[in-house]
Image (spheres, grey):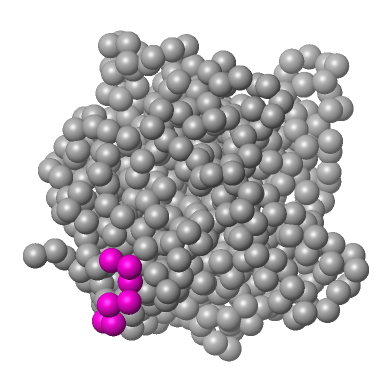
Amino acid sequence: MATQVIWIVFAVLATFTLGYMGYSRYLSRFVELDEERDTPAHKYEDGQEYVPAKKPVLLGHHFSSIAGGAPIVGPITAGAVWGWVPALLWIAIGNPLMGSVHDFVSLSGSLRHEGKSIGYIIGEYVGEEGKNMLLWFAFLTIVLVVAVFALVVAIVFDAFPQVTTASFLYIALALAFGVYLYQLNGPFIPGTVLFVAGVFAGIWVGVEFPFAIYPAVGDASYPAGTIVLSEIVGLGAGTWVPGSSAVAMNPNRAAWVPIILVYAGIASALPVWVLLQPRDYLSSFLLYSGVGGVLLAVIVGTIFGTASQPLVVADSLGAFNGFWGVEAAGLAPLFPLLFITIACGTISGFHSLVSSGTTAKQLDKETDARLIGYGGMLGEGLLAAVALSTLAVAGFADPAGGIGAALPNFATGGGIILTSFYIPTSYGAPFMALVLVSFLLTSTDTAARLGRYMMEEIVGVPTGETRSGFENLGGSPREAISGLARGRYTNPVLQAIPAYLMVISGEWLTLWALFGGANQLLAALALLTATIWLANWDDSKQLISTGVPMAIMTTITVIGLAWLAFYSNLYQNIILGGASDTAALISSVVQMVLALILIGLALSLVRKGYDNISEAREGHTVDRAEPSDD
């Protein structure tokens, strides 16, 4: 008997409700949240960074910032490789016990340290060297974020040329909305109605006028009437495009990758009012309608039978595909790779950068941290459950196609589920694809912006200072690189180049697992930071709630990154010649070196943290440093 998809939704809702009603209440008392205590937003209110925000407003902003494409891509990848049951269990159990704890303590710890970032906090206890290690670790993780999301956007653009057109219109509308609000001082509510309607109308335009750069390859086909740029201007079939023949790639996808990286770099350098703020606001409507709509549609379609087909798990998607997963994925052990493949849907180090770096500066009351920190992460878990549900409905009939075949199922399955509301799949599927791409574009250029901030902090650009990056190009190579790193417009190049070198291999599973491992290891370091803070705060504080997840995630991610470095890249791709061309070989070397650097930085920080915790718990006085802001 086929399993109904509604059980995936109910399982997640059940564990998440227990976590929020019980565990989050305990954690709030544990860190002594006090509604009467002034938050950094009130103590340092400056109208720019430290600004108290109402709880619903801050929850929406925080959720939009953390809910990128990863909680969609991770569950789809893991469900396709190892089966939907292992993926569901890791989301339903791991999120309330680990991921939501991580986000909550990152936010709470920042509240106790004047709204400072986790890098600053760990530096206060283990010194300036520890702070710089964490900044470098976070920057390298950001490079991986930019790389994988550029590839995923390219895959979706290729699968749904309709959403390519809709995405360009979406970005144009966001730019226009920014001008409307901040330059023309247009009224907010009428503007919201007008521009949100424009975003949804863009889906119709995309359906009518799909767009691609190169023709479809092999058995794939584009919708009738697709505008193919290469056929108009005579660019040929595109086989000359770097990476076009790699796994998970084709000429159209390979051509989109550099365009997306350029977009991310430009967007990261623009003032926030030009694109980031209006785009995040408009994307929140896609977020709520996409996630909430699918969850509700699963319930309605199951109870009333209004969907175009029964909402059951497709036979082509296995419940459990064994420890090594589907054969087409290669040698992919469930432990540790499952736990780093599903990154943001269960736990994400990227969230600690948002929680401690921006959200903590806007918290109106300390008690709001429970809903925004713990509850916000549960919301991301619901997005992961939606992704798994769409894959379950659409099925996975072509394991040999890898992620290139599995990822578009988010839109296909979502379109089927939305027929519960009598929405035709010809519109429902492009809408879900636009939901996915809007998250991905948000994640990509937000990550590039955060990477720029981190590099500026690493090289010591004073707060408020802006440099172009071209000042030292005529000097020595060292001076030129330093100048590029300090430049607002050139800094993103330092992220885009290594990101592109990794992407053009097209080795999706390895690249995504490398990103997941780095992201999860960053989460372990954020939990380490929280554990150090608790140990130094009061020697009676238990360290289990943060220490156990930290130890588990450190173990999983170090083993996972070592597997990717030595087996997947060194042994398979380099020694056995699995890298099909020079681009793939370069990508494998970059991935291997990056994985080893991340392991080294993380273990060094864990050692420093362990020494600090040991001294604090043995009753020794631990000198607290004052990390510099440069």
Q: Main secondary structure of the magenta part?
A: loop
Q: Residue 608 falls in which quadrant of the image?
A: top left
Residue drawn at x 39%, y 14% as measured from the top left:
580
Is 132 inside the magenta-drawn segment? no
Magenta segment: 303-309
Q: Residue furthest bottom?
A: 36
Looking at the image, residue 391 lies above or below residue 34: above
Residue drawn at x 43%, y 61% as measured from the top left:
425
Is 308 inside the magenta-drawn segment? yes
Task: Tell me if 254 is positioned left or right of 480 in this view.
Answer: left
Q: Residue furthest front?
A: 224
State the image coordinates of residue 151 (x, y, percent, origin top left). 50, 37
Q: Could you tell me if residue 93 is visible in this image?
A: no
State the image coordinates of residue 216 (x, y, percent, origin top left). 49, 32
Q: Residue furthest left?
A: 1
Task: Tell me if 469 is positioned left or right of 586 in this view.
Answer: right
State the image coordinates of residue 150 (x, y, percent, origin top left). 55, 39
Q: Residue 361 falls in which quadrant of the image?
A: bottom right
> Is 196 in front, or is 33?
196
Task: Tell me if 252 is positioned left or right of 25 in this view.
Answer: right
Task: Tell me if 383 is positioned left or right of 91 in this view.
Answer: right
Residue drawn at x 64%, y 27% as measured from the top left:
230
